[in-house]
């Protein structure tokens, strides 16, 4: 169903009770393509999706923004493992009766997407893996690093300004793109989610630490993810460095990689027009492996 | 001018006398965009351009295939430096009266393209850098490596079959794409160039060895190449490994990177539909940095 004018800014939050928890989500757009479920980054809520990305993607497909357990108004506790988070997405998809979806996993969400593809391969048609890392990846969200601590402890930054510093590079064009991003995030003024607190952050950081561990053959599991993937990152990502995207593109059997210059963790928001074009080409492609 | 039906298969070879040498070239297509000059790989001649790449690119622009000095029917000696090769491209462009062009540099050609952008920045609008490396790159065309020697010394391989093994991965889909590529190259039966001999190879290998040397700050020169670039490679390139493309994308100020899965040095020929789509988006884009 096409909901005229219903976009990320004004789409009402819905709630669905499942066998695990009750999840908050937003659903908009429409079309013949499988729905695209968007999986959010570290401490992000439904309100952290940039309408410049999600709205154009919803032109030819349903977009579903998913709030995992313990985040925003979803019930339950945030799991301390990626596998635990994947179980929540599976419960959500099952409750909605979805049997075939595309996934847009950003950062933490990209790890959950990979885990879901391993646990329930039949559910996942194609994946966009943005600013993320494979299991066994390196330097994943080490907030104690000086360059990140400096930003996180800067008390002069309020509102979205911390996010702008974390997700964009120090260059003038990147910071300008960051301010535009912050303005877009602020455009939704009602029916917003409560921001995440330290409890959410601690559990998700524990999940990152687990995800960094190498067990068995490094990156060996990626061979089993045979879905076409589009891996995307900025070459100056301080939070999950771009070499993790190289690992993904080199070890996933069917992954294309796109990187953006002078861009950090939020490359999809900085280059939203290009990202939407690349994502649409990829999702609409009938080819097995390429956009 | 649009030359209906004139494509890489049947476009006549032309010759132009310049202040340096007389160069063989082929010119076809037409449109308002700047012409796209294609710079060829190690030992390749005009006949090594895949019509599945060059013909669709010529739909909206002129495509000019350039034969550098000492290759094919171009006169002179093959320079033993990338800088020497760049001088031939500059003489060629000047003789044709071209003042603003796009460059598609494949492998060796990508190095020449970078050097031309440094010497004469005003000439170059945008660059496609495919399967190539920056100055100071690593493991560039070391034909003595066991995996390459095995192919080069295999006497059971004739015609294009050596190229298929070198440019494509051992997988069934990649080898099938390689055979299709060989068939396309063989479609032009008249007005062909003489294949390159050992003298061409030796001079070009000397140029590769010089290009590997790090002088001064590694990759420092790349900061001066401010043109938008699209860097493309296969993640299994044995001849110029993909990490050289990472170096380019990380150090060029305005470079996007696209990599292809299960693809080698000839990724643009294997994924020709996707490559043409990406190249066209990039060349047609009005944005400063992204496709």
Image (cartoon, coloured by chain):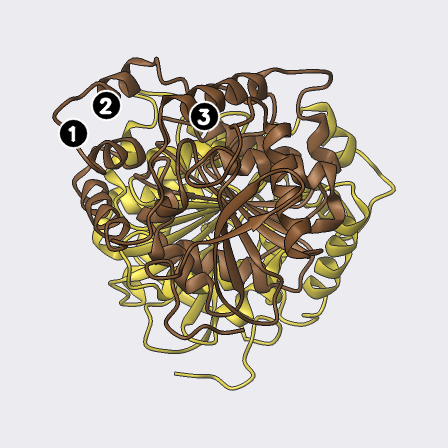
Chain colours: A yellow, B brown
x, y percent for residue A20: 34, 53
The chain carrying label 1 is B
Q: How crowded is mark 1: few (under 14 residues within 10 Å), some or many (20 or more)?
A: some
Report x, y in % for residue B231: 53, 43
Q: How many labels does the image show?
A: 3
Q: Position of residue A21 (x, y in %)?
A: 39, 55
Which chain is indicated by disc 2? Answer: B
Task: Please say if B117 is above or below B51.
Answer: above
Q: Give the residue furthest to the bottom.
A: A4
Which of the labelled discs sits on residue A212, or is there none? 3
Q: Which mark is residue B157?
A: 1
The residue at 73%/37% (across/down) is: B119
Q: Quadrant of residue A179?
A: bottom right
Circle 2 residue: B151
Quarter of the image that includes the N terminus of chain B: bottom right
Return the x and y of residue B84 as percentages of the image width and height. 62, 29
Name the residue furthest right: A156
A39 left or right of B214 in image = left
Dot 1 falls on a residue whose secondary structure is: loop
């Amino acid at each position: 169903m096409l909901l005229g004018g219903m976009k990320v800014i004004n789409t009402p939050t819905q709630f669905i009770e499942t066998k695990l928890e009750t999840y908050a989500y937003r659903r908009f757009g429409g079309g013949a393509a499988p729905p695209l479920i968007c999986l959010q980054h570290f401490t992000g809520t439904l309100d952290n999706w940039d309408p410049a990305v999600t709205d154009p993607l919803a032109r030819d497909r349903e977009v579903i923004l998913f709030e995992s357990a313990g985040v925003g108004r979803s019930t339950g506790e945030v799991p301390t493992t990626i596998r635990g988070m994947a179980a929540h997405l599976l419960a959500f998809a099952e409750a909605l009766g979805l049997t075939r979806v595309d996934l847009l996993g950003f950062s933490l969400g990209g790890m959950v997407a990979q885990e879901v593809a391993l646990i329930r391969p039949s559910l996942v048609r194609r994946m966009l893996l943005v600013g993320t890392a494979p299991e066994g990846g390196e330097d994943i969200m080490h907030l104690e690093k000086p360059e990140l601590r400096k930003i996180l402890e800067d008390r002069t930054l309020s509102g979205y300004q911390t996010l702008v510093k974390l997700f964009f590079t120090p260059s003038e064009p990147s910071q300008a793109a960051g301010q535009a991003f912050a303005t877009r995030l602020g455009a939704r003024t009602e029916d917003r989610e409560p921001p995440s607190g330290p409890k959410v952050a601690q559990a998700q950081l524990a999940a990152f630490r687990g995800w960094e561990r190498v067990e068995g053959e490094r990156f060996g599991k990626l061979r089993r993810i045979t879905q076409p993937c589009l891996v995307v990152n900025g070459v100056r990502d301080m939070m999950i460095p771009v070499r993790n995207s190289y690992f993904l593109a080199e070890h996933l059997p069917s992954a294309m990689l796109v990187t953006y210059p002078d861009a950090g963790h939020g490359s999809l928001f900085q280059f939203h027009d290009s990202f939407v074009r690349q994502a649409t080409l990829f999702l609409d492609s009938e080819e097995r492996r390429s956009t």
